[in-house]
Image (cartoon, coloured by chain):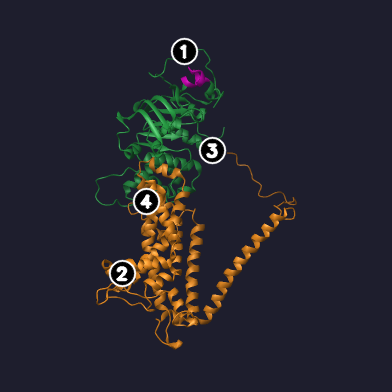
Chain colours: A orange, B green
Amino acid sequence: MSTAQLASAPPSGSTIARAPRERTNSWPLVDRVGYWLCWTVGISLCLIALAIVLFMLIKGISYLRPSLLVRSPAPSQVQSQSGGFLDPIEGTLLVAGLGTVIAAPLGVAIAAWLSEYARPAWLARTVESALEIIAGAPSVVLALFGLLIFAQNFLGFLSQRAASGAVYGRSFFAAGAIMAVLALPLIVGATREGLAQLPDRLREASFALGRTRATTIRRVLLPAIRADIATGTVLGMGRIIGDTAIIRILLGAALTIQPVGHVPLIGALRGTGSTLTSYVYENSPAGEGNAPQKAYAAAFVLLLIVLFLNGIVTWLTNRGGQSERGGLSRAFRLIPYWSRLNGP
Amino acid sequence: MDPMMPPPVRRIAIDRDPYVAPPRSTGNGATPATTIATRLRAPRAVSAHIRERMRVESVWLAYGDNWVVRDVSLPVRQGEVLAMIGASGSGKTTLLRSLNRLTEITAAAARSGQITLDGQDIHELEVNDLRRRVTMVFQQPNPFPMSIFDNVAYALAERPGRGGRRRRRSSEIEHAVADALHRAGLYDEVADDLERSALRLSGGQQQRLCIARALAAEPEVLLLDEPCSALDPISTATIEELIVELRDSVAIVIVTHNLQQAFRVADHVAFMHLGELVEYGTSTQVFDQPTKERTRDYISGAFG
């Protein structure tokens, strides 16, 4: 290798040309109209989003008090005594957590089967259609269906029984399970997309080393699409957090968490409660509480949570192709569905 | 000469092969048909321990109704490098992939004839066992998106009979990984940080990592499918040198479009055309005294 001295820049005084800005003057009229239409629509969308955030920000901040975040709702006509929304925040986290824990492993498994096995073909097609149906079903329909299921006698242990023996069918378990169905298509979709983008040579490389398809999926493919799986999961979480119908129907109408029995977490999960969405609904002019100030404050918190999740999605998507070595990515490795427990 | 270029590998040729008719020309002073390749090659010694590992016997291979390999018979020997040359569509890659049954990934693949590994029909072996014994390196470097260490450790032969889960990173595994990296000539370049992502290596390093990975499985046969076609000349030279070094411990089959490369690394050359094995012989025979018209045309650049 010759080690020639490399010039660091063109000689001083020489003119440096950059790419000129694109001009539309010479374009056909149709193209110009289309071009400006795109700009207009894009900017309008930004304005609408900005308006929502600003509106909620102003309303929310003017009504949000720290005490609201730490106090439970209380039944009272007087606003100063009707408490805060600690329980709904906890409820939101419970439902989102439960839904995600159920949906993520199932979704990844379905996606892996659809992308890597998909035999017999008719079954794969049926599964795809089923996913489309679930994705397209209004959540209120899913909720009604869920009520039908969880009111079955043999599922009584997931909610509570009346003295007569009838199963109530409403609980965090019920809501979480149906929420999982809601999140499932998003997780399956993101995972399948990730798997589809992996080049076949990755699979061939693994097969050529005498590794089975299952090992290949578990140890090569799924770790490679961690970012996609996480993105789908966070999107699914957002969907869960934002849903109201399932909460109203499957979590009961109580605003506070009403545990069943005395086992700490299980009791709460068998019991009923509320989430931020049902709290907002309850306190909006349409609901029974009719305390719009609190609805605004709760809606603001809800929006913050969703925006935070969106931020995570963006972050995960941007770093998707890079190698993962950070502390947070190691934390993500702990999430069970891409477990590498049998690693070398 | 560029100091980064490794010197040519030296050996003295002693060629005797039952599959090939003796060269027609006997005149000692006769000048062979000289190709560009001949001028680039230094004489090499034949390995002392040649041993047949695989045998391809009247093999036909098809995708759907299209027979792409027609009645090919070949030996694959440890201690020497077998190069398969031929134009695109000549079936050489398909034949290579059939040696560890990778052709079976394609649903429509069909076959006839017999391939044996150490005397056993490979279709009677468990497919993943076979692929651990006959590993493969591909045209495009395809390291897994994980650390260098994990890439190699992934390929390590699983050692059954040890109760419970193996500890991650036992010294045994570390040793095996380092050994594979050494054999692939990559260890010194990456030893400082084996936890680095394999995707950050250069193309040539990635390909040597893939070779290390293929060697970590302790195979008996190593298949190389145009391993240098995506690499620059310096990386290519490094890998070619490596291939010649490895031939004593593992039987090597290399498919290549690059005739000079075949000439530089191979002890035996198989020329395939339209699915048929046109000529098989030692590389000096095939390149300097080809017996068939088509071989002569191909190596002199008349087609292909």
Kindly identify the residue that appears in the image at 38 percent across and 50 percent down: A113
The residue beneath circle 2 is: A151
Q: Residue B49 carries which label?
A: none
Q: Are marks 2 and 1 in contact (CB under 8 Å)?
A: no
Is residue A98 something that shows in the picture?
no
Mark 2–mark 1 Cα distance, whole angstroms, equals 90 Å
Residue identified by numbered label 3: B232
Q: How crowded is mark 1: few (under 14 residues within 10 Å), some or many (20 or more)?
A: few
Magenta region, main secondary structure: helix
Q: Which stretch is magenta?
A: B285-296
Residue B288: say if magenta: yes
Compared with B79, B178 (above or below) is below
Task: Read off the chain for label 2.
Answer: A
The span from disc 1 to disc 3 (Cα, nearest Å) is 38 Å
Q: Which of marks 1 and 3 is nearer the N terminus?
A: 1
Residue A218: assigned label: 4
Image spot of residue A101 (x, y percent):
37, 63
Instruction: Tell me the residue that label 1 is attached to.
Output: B24
Residue A197 in picture, x, y percent from top left: 48, 49
Q: Distance between the residues labelled 4 and 1?
A: 57 Å
Distance (Cα) linking label 3 and label 2: 68 Å
